[in-house]
Image (tube, rainbow, N blue to C red):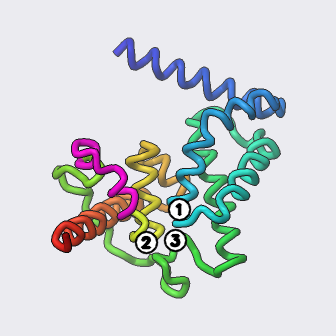
Amino acid sequence: MLECETLAEALTTDTQRIARGLRQRDVALLHQLVEQYQFRLVRYLIYLLGSRDPVDDLVQETWLRVLEHGRSYDGRSRFEPWLFTIARNLTIDHLRKRRNVSLDSNGHPDHPEQNREPAPIASTAPSPFELAARTEEAHRIAHTLQSLEPIYREALVLRFQEELSLQEMSTVMGVPLTTVSSRIYRGLATLREHMEGDEHAD
């Protein structure tokens, strides 16, 4: 219990330090954040878009927004969800301008996710991500992820690669917890189907 409290205190101190630095527009802090989170930010955006083409510009714009709107980060929660939310909003704007596609439309702009029954939480069976860790098939998982609809791909990446909590995912994606759970479940099921299909094809 004491160890958990110590970790929580350390996290709180770190987030408050980041919030204080952003309020002061501390450029040194920004460089530190870029060094710490750049890889994760790039990876998230590549999976989100399914392409590398616009990612560099979006990453640069994300960090500019972090510096410009740093006062809105209060340090009460982890920095990652706040950062990913900024990146996601910029990506949505990019898609609307270029392709008229919404990340939340299940790949079909005219048929948004609506009135769906929440899917059950994924079963206790090992997920493809857990299996990949055991069998060193991470590259294959990454390749198969690209075939999923963006909303499911994003849910799996945020949950299993970025290790965000369901509540943090709800904040980033701007959807209720039931929708987050549904997307994780459906994403895992689809990913498993695709991987099993590839095995049979081999």
The secondary structure type at the circle numbered 3 is loop
Residue at the spot x=76%, y=40% of the render? 70
Residue at the spot x=42%, y=42% of the render? 163
Mark 3 or mark 2, which is nearer the start of the sequence?
3
Give percent across and percent down for residue 195: 25, 65
Tags 3 and 1 in contact by the CB under 8 Å rule? no
Q: Quadrant of the N terminus?
A: top left
Q: Main secondary structure of the magenta part?
A: helix
Left/right placement of residue 103 relative to residue 192 reads: right
Labelled disc at residue 48 = 1
Mark 1 or mark 3, which is nearer the start of the sequence?
1
Camera-nearest label, 2 or 3:
2
User: Amino acid type of disc 3?
Assistant: Asp
The secondary structure type at the circle numbered 2 is loop
The number of numbered badges drawn on the structure is: 3
Left/right placement of residue 158 relative to residue 79 reads: left
Extent of the magenta region: 131-144
Q: Is residue 26 above or below residue 5?
A: below
Residue identified by numbered label 2: 149
Residue identified by numbered label 3: 104
User: Amino acid type of disc 2?
Assistant: Glu
* Number of residues whose C-alpha sits closer than 10 Å to that of mark 2, classed few (under 14), some (14–19) or many (20 or more): some
Residue at the spot x=36%, y=53% of the render? 139
Labelled disc at residue 116 = none
Q: Is residue 78 above or below residue 143?
A: above
- Give me the C-alpha separation between circle 2 and circle 3: 10 Å
The secondary structure type at the circle numbered 1 is helix
User: Amino acid type of disc 1?
Assistant: Leu
Give percent across and percent down for residue 188: 29, 61
